[in-house]
Image (cartoon, helix red, strand yellow):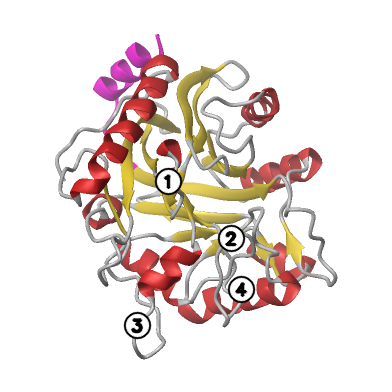
């Protein structure tokens, strides 16, 4: 029914539009650090996203979860992550416009690491969400509303926790808190947001279907008027839904998990993830709404140990080392099965890159 409704709207309304791409968890494991290390001691991530740059940069706005602090040397992978600042350069060069930082690893280098992460973002002029120097700093950033082709889109970012590590100073991290979320949503609307995107770090790791808590929180956010609910953290993909919101009468797009964007994880379902592409349009009254959504699968080809680096490729690509082909096929098979069985009105994007 919603597909018919949206198709009719597209015929009746002048098609002012905007497209937003959301990517999953940009991880930084030790194997990635080792492969990126150069003879002079620097870290080079430049090959990471070359194959996906056309897809990312073709959107009007792109968002990614940076699941590591930028805490300075020494750099480290799991369990206490810390990436080189060059990692952010590789992401912005690929076309990303906003970094999400509210995730369970942001306190891996404690409060100092959070402050340095903020300093690194700001020194590079990179917009970010989810972490702040203090409450006043948070109030100066939120509501964050971006004008995307004339659409005023507010972005919010929350995490379920930080692996049991607690802050010791007045830094602020956006944790999942329903009262806080309602307040943030209200303030965004008061400041003129037409579309609100809530990016949530939640769910059970390595589970291909959302849990009851995710579903309840998604329902809560939708009932409070959020049009885009974008999830991460499980390190595997979970279903996507584009449905009419009974509370608002407007379409709502929910992604339970985009999975890993890039990582060094080795199980079949963690070797890749999905990017979601959302199109915004206006109805006959000029109101912004989510017109359609699609997904694209991506796959991480790790370093083969011959001096080459990790790289992210479209999951349909067969241009990879032969030893990775069975892993690629297994990831695509499992992800496609989940999406085919559970997605609602969110098809796969098969456009050639």
Q: CA distance from mark 4 to mark 2?
A: 21 Å
Q: Earlier in the sequence, mark 4 or mark 2?
A: 2
Q: Earlier in the sequence, mark 1 or mark 3?
A: 1
Q: Which span of residues is magenta-colored?
A: 1-18
Asked if the magenta segment contains residue 147, the reply would be no
Displayed quadrant of residue 75:
bottom right
Asked if the magenta segment contains residue 5, the reply would be yes
Q: Secondary structure at mark 2?
A: loop
x and y, in percent, of residue 243 in the image: 48, 19
Q: Secondary structure at mark 3?
A: loop
x and y, in percent, of residue 323 in the image: 24, 47
Mark 3 and 2 residues: CB-CB less than 8 Å, in contact? no
Left/right placement of residue 193 relative to residue 24 reads: right
Name the front one of labels 4 and 2: 2
Q: Residues within 10 Å of mark 3 (few under 14, many from 20)?
A: few
Q: Which residue is mark 2?
A: 78
Q: CA distance from mark 2 to mark 1?
A: 24 Å
Q: Secondary structure at mark 1?
A: strand
Name the residue: 61% across, 76% down: 71
x and y, in percent, of residue 151 in the image: 42, 46
Mark 3 and 4 residues: CB-CB less than 8 Å, in contact? no
Q: Nearer the viewer, residue 49 or 272?
A: 272
- Examine the rendering and report whether any part of residue 16 can be seen: no
Q: Which residue is mark 3?
A: 38
Displayed quadrant of residue 51:
bottom left
Is residue 243 placed above or below 81 in the rendered structure? above
């Amino acid at each position: 029914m919603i597909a018919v409704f949206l198709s009719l709207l597209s015929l009746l309304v002048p098609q002012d539009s905007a497209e937003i791409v959301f990517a999953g968890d940009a991880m930084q494991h030790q194997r990635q650090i080792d492969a990126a290390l150069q003879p002079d001691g620097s870290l080079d991530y430049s090959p990471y996203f070359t194959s996906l740059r056309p897809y990312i940069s073709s959107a009007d706005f792109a968002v990614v979860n940076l699941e590591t602090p930028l805490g300075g040397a020494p750099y480290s992978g799991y369990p206490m992550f810390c990436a080189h600042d060059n990692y952010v350069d590789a992401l912005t060069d690929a076309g990303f416009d906003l970094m999400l930082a509210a995730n369970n690893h942001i306190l891996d280098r404690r409060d100092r690491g959070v402050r340095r992460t903020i300093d690194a973002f700001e020194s590079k002029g990179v917009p970010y969400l989810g972490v702040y120097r203090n409450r006043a700093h948070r109030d100066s950033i939120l509501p964050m509303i971006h004008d995307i082709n004339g659409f005023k889109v507010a972005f919010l970012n929350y995490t379920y926790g930080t692996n049991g590590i607690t802050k010791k100073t007045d830094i602020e991290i956006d944790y999942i808190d329903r009262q806080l979320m309602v307040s943030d949503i209200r303030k965004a609307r008061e400041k003129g947001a037409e579309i609100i995107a809530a990016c949530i770090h939640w769910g059970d790791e390595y589970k291909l279907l959302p849990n009851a808590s995710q579903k309840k929180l998604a329902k809560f956010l939708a009932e409070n008027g959020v049009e885009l609910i974008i999830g991460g953290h499980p390190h595997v993909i979970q279903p996507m839904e584009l449905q009419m919101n009974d509370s608002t009468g407007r379409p709502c797009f929910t992604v339970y998990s985009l999975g890993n964007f890039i990582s060094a994880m080795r199980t079949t379902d963690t070797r890749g993830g999905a990017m979601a592409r959302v199109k915004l349009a206006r109805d006959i009254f000029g109101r912004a709404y989510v017109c359609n959504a699609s997904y694209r699968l991506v796959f991480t080809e790790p370093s083969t140990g011959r001096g080459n680096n990790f790289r992210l490729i479209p999951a349909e690509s067969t241009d990879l080392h032969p030893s990775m082909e069975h892993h690629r096929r297994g990831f695509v098979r499992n992800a496609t099965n989940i999406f085919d069985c559970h997605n609602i009105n969110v098809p796969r994007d098969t456009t050639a890159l």
